[in-house]
Amino acid sequence: MARLAALTGNNAAAEAIRQIKPDVFAAYPITPQTEMAEEVAQFVADGILDTEYIPVESEHSSMSACIGASLAGARAMTATASCGLAYMWELLPIAASLRSSVVMAVVNRAFNAPLNIHCSHDDSMGARDSGWIQLYSENAQEMYDNLIQAVKIAEDETVRLPVMVCMDGFIISHAVERLLLLEDKKVKNFLGEFKPAYPLLEVNNPVTLGACALPDYYTEHKKQHSEALRHSIDKIMGVANEYAKLSGRSYSLFESYQLADAEYGIVILNSAAGVTKAVVDKLRKEGVKAGLLKIRVYRPFPAAQIVQALKNLKVVAVLERTDSFGGVGSPVFTDISAAFMEASTKEKPLMVNYVYGLGGRDVGLEDIGKVYANLQAINQRGKIEKSFAYLQARE
Amino acid sequence: MAINLKEIAKKEELFTPGHRLCAGCGTAVLMRQVMLAVEGPVVVSMATSCPFVSTATYPYTAWKVPWIHNAFENAPATISGVEAAYKALRKRGKITQEIKFISMAGDGGTYDIGFQALSGALERGHRFLHICYNNEAYMNTGIQRSGATPLGAHTTTSPAGKLIPGKREFRKDLTAIIAAHDIPYVAQTTPFHWRDLMTKVQKALTVDGPSFINVLTSCHRGWRSDIKDAMQILRLAVDTCYWPLYEVVNGKWRLNYKVRNKLPVIEWIKPQGRFAHLLKEENQPIVAQIQQKIDENWEKLLARCVAD
Ligand SMILES: Cc1ncc(C[n+]2csc(CCOP(=O)(O)OP(=O)(O)O)c2C)c(N)n1
């Protein structure tokens, strides 16, 4: 029987970790992830969770230890945020190109300066090109569900790539929500045992991992990694389908909300999808064909599927909780623009990019309402005047 | 635990020939000694450095043991993950064998950029041996100074110039700093003293907890010395008391080699081109400073060591 619970996002993630039962968990505290690291430590201290908890001296070491543990043949997990993710930056591409199966919870938090402990997506968006799979979660339920699925994806023999599972700092990590938890046994059976490919601890079959590869071989290593990441999209869907049978909750590459016949769309990630749905509902009642596309799988990027979902809209706003300073637009906007360039379709919406909610600034019904109003105005004008703007900023 | 040369000669080489380290590289010699000293299965984690690029360039490897390179500053953190995985899988009954763990890094990867990861892993009590192959500079990137580079040495980032006579700071006493971590086993040695080195590796691998060995090793490219002198220079390092052979076992300091005829430090300085400028008249005060420091440290060490 599923259990109904009232948990914060951090509690929910910790609960998922308890059920996943990693062999090794290495973490270093950082707001707003701290509670999760504490709770897992408490599980271990209370004998509820049989895991080697490595209380590392830094995030650089938590990721280093997870890479070592995963390649040794163990199920390894960690969690971090913001500066912590930045501090382990060097190791992200190593974890991925060495084909480790590390799963990491990322509680999205802004980058300094100015120092800010609240939500932006600077951390995980910056890491989008590190070769990891990235899943985004709107709420505690999705964080819980995504973490469990992430382990199955990461450890799949056709994938063997690390997965980052993101939720919004404070907005989700610290807010209590109602959610459904699976039985421990179900999670255990769903995940099965980790079957590593060439584990270091198989001492009778010694392998050299992390070798140096010069111009004669480096390209082939990277190409294999690149292909593995692109191909993982099928497995991600396969795992989602299996998980749906288990949990009754279905997941896809992205969620389409009132999108099929929509004229005005917002593309968004994580918690702000909630308020956007509320605005969509309101506008629909008023006869405005508003819709939402909420990305769940950002890497590998489901380009063709997103083009298909957006191509018939009139105007689309990509809302992002980060800025790619000096770029064409923020990361998701740039990706979707590129996806349309690449696609053979002639239909294509007008598209704008708005930066919102930086450093935890609340995004409300009015803010999102304004965006949809802008989209309608753009449609009336028939052209875009300013494709990139900061919402909510004082002038 | 006597090291028997006849027995060793029969052992399989786990660090194999055909690697790309320089002829006369002290680190190649010490790697071989370490791997011959090891008994039973072992997993090695190595930091980015000369011996990394020279022994594990795809599609070749010189290693016949499970071996991982992760990055420059995290060999001890990486092995702590491997060791934790071992503990977990052993508890779950998936592994039954006894396995030992070694992390290795140069002086750059140990004294400087890797110091935090090492200190953390030692404090957490993982069961592993960290070996520092200490050639007193960043050799892989072309002889830059490190926290292990001695006063007066010329490196490419502490060059001897018209105004500045090489490195202006003393090296840090890392072995003592590691000993202050209160771990079961800490030692210093050199590959010239092969029996001492191999005995220390064996001792370190039997303790129940972290251990550390700081191995002074020569680099003729960086030290600007004659290839054939590699081992003799290391002998001089010990005979001048520049690099005493000692160990700290459960907090007890012990001298492993009593230097009876302590040679003046100039004997260690002379054969090395990195110190060439110190032979000039105007730099004699630096030599005197070096000698004084060695004398002080030697007295301090003797006072710390328990009488046998
Ligand atoms: C984070 C990072 N900074 C710098 C480097 C460049 N680097 C690679 S090896 C090395 C020096 C290694 O020196 P040491 O640890 O003394 O070993 P040796 O090569 O002398 O054996 C440096 C600076 C790197 N790989 N990673």
Image (tube, coloured by chain):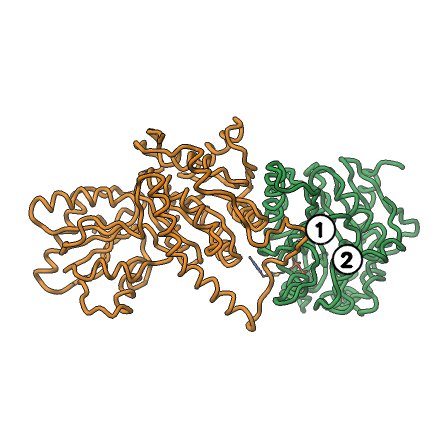
Chain colours: A orange, B green
Relative to A194, A324 lies left or right? left
Q: Is the residue under label 2 in contact with that under label 1 (CB below 8 Å)?
A: yes
Residue B138 location in percent, x, y? 65, 61
Q: Check disc 2 and report its element: helix, strand or loop.
A: helix
Relative to A299, B274 lies left or right? right
Relative to A35, B183 lies left or right? right
Residue A118 visible somewhere in the drawing: no
Q: Are marks 1 and 2 on the same chain?
A: yes
Q: Which residue is mark 2?
A: B30
Residue A100 location in percent, x, y? 52, 52
Q: Residue at x 76, y 35 (%)?
A: B250
Q: CA–CA distance between discs 1 and 2? A: 10 Å
- Mark 1 Cα within 10 Å, few/some/many (few <14, many 20+)? many
Q: Which residue is mark 1?
A: B131
Furthest toward the top, the residue is A46
Asked if B190 appears above or below A185 in the picture, the reply is: below
Asked if B88 appears above or below B34 in the picture, the reply is: above
Furthest toward the bottom, the residue is A216
Asked if B25 appears above or below A271 in the picture, the reply is: below
Protein chain holding label 1: B
Where on the picture, by quarter, is residue A243? Answer: top left
Q: Depth check: give the residue in front, B97 or A58.
A: B97
Determine the quadrant in which ligand 1 lies: bottom right
Residue A86 location in percent, x, y? 45, 51
**The CB of the residue at mark 1 lies under 8 Å from ligand 1:** no
Protein chain holding label 2: B
Q: Check disc 1 and report its element: helix, strand or loop.
A: strand
Where on the picture, by quarter, is residue B106? Answer: bottom right
Q: Depth check: give the residue in front, B261 or A3.
A: A3
Q: Residue at x 84, y 50 (%)?
A: B196
Number of marks in the rendered image: 2
Residue B272 location in percent, x, y? 78, 65
